[in-house]
Image (tube, rainbow, N blue to C red):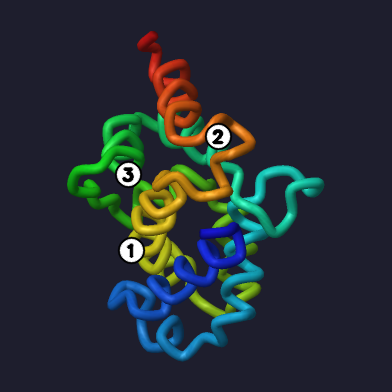
């Protein structure tokens, strides 16, 4: 699964989320895919991508390391609350994402709470996305460094 496919899958999960409200379920998939790429891409040079390392680091620094590990592993994905999403991205980034889509911050955080676990879980299943960090073993190595275990 390439990066574009992952972002489209994340967009579909966002649209299907009950937490994104009526406005979220009526969003245009390509517009949402683009907004997700901007939100999750990290630096502008990685625009439209998915910066898994930054996402994991943000989760860990926000006390969400256990949830991130569940998304990377093969077992059940732990859920994340919309409040935790808001804290992880910060009000400014979440507000910008929400306004790009014409959503409230609550709807945006709710949709992301459903979409992100699926997106990261699929990203960590040996796709081309992880080639740059050494595949799943590289992701797990990165995760263990981020989470202070070697």
Nearest the camera: 146 or 94?
146
Residue at the spot 36% in from the left edge and 11% down from the top edge: 149
Residue lying at the far left in this picture: please name it.
76
Residues at discs 2 and 3 in contact (Cβ within 8 Å): no
Residue 53's disc is 2
Along the polypeptide, which appears first: circle 2 or circle 3? 2
- The mark lying in front, picked from 1 and 2, is 2
**Residue, disc 3:** 71
Q: In the figure, 53 relative to 85: above or below?
A: above
Residue 91: image location, x then y, percent: 54, 52
The residue that mark 1 highlights is 114
Q: Position of residue 103 (x, y in %)?
A: 51, 77
Question: Residue 138, position in %: x, y?
Answer: 50, 27
x 31%, y 72%: residue: 19
Closer to the chain start, of discs 3 and 1, is 3
Front residue of 10/80: it is: 10
- Which residue is at 63% across, 36% downward? 132
**Residue at position x 36%, y 50% from top?**
121
Mark 1 residue crowding within 10 angstroms, few (<14) / some (14–19) / many (20+):
many
Describe residue 95's horizontal placement relative to residue 81 as left or right.
Answer: right
- The quadrant of the picture occupied by the C terminus is top left
Mark 3 nearby-residue class (10 Å; few <14, some 14–19, many ≥20): many
**Residue 58 locus on image (x, y percent):** 50, 35
Q: Is residue 50 left or right of residue 56?
A: right
């Amino acid at each position: 699964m390439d990066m574009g496919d992952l972002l489209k899958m994340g967009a579909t999960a966002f649209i299907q989320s009950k937490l994104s409200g009526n406005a979220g379920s009526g969003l245009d998939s390509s517009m949402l895919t683009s907004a997700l790429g901007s939100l999750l891409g990290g630096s502008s040079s990685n625009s439209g991508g998915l910066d898994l390392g930054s996402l994991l680091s943000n989760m860990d620094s926000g006390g969400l390391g256990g949830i991130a590990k569940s998304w990377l592993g093969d077992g059940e994905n732990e859920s994340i609350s919309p409040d935790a999403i808001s804290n992880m991205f910060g009000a400014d980034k979440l507000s910008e994402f929400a306004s790009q889509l014409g959503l409230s911050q609550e709807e945006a955080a709710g949709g992301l709470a459903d979409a992100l676990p699926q997106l990261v879980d699929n990203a960590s299943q040996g796709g081309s996305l992880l080639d740059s960090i050494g595949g799943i073993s590289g992701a797990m190595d990165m995760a263990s460094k981020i989470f202070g275990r070697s």
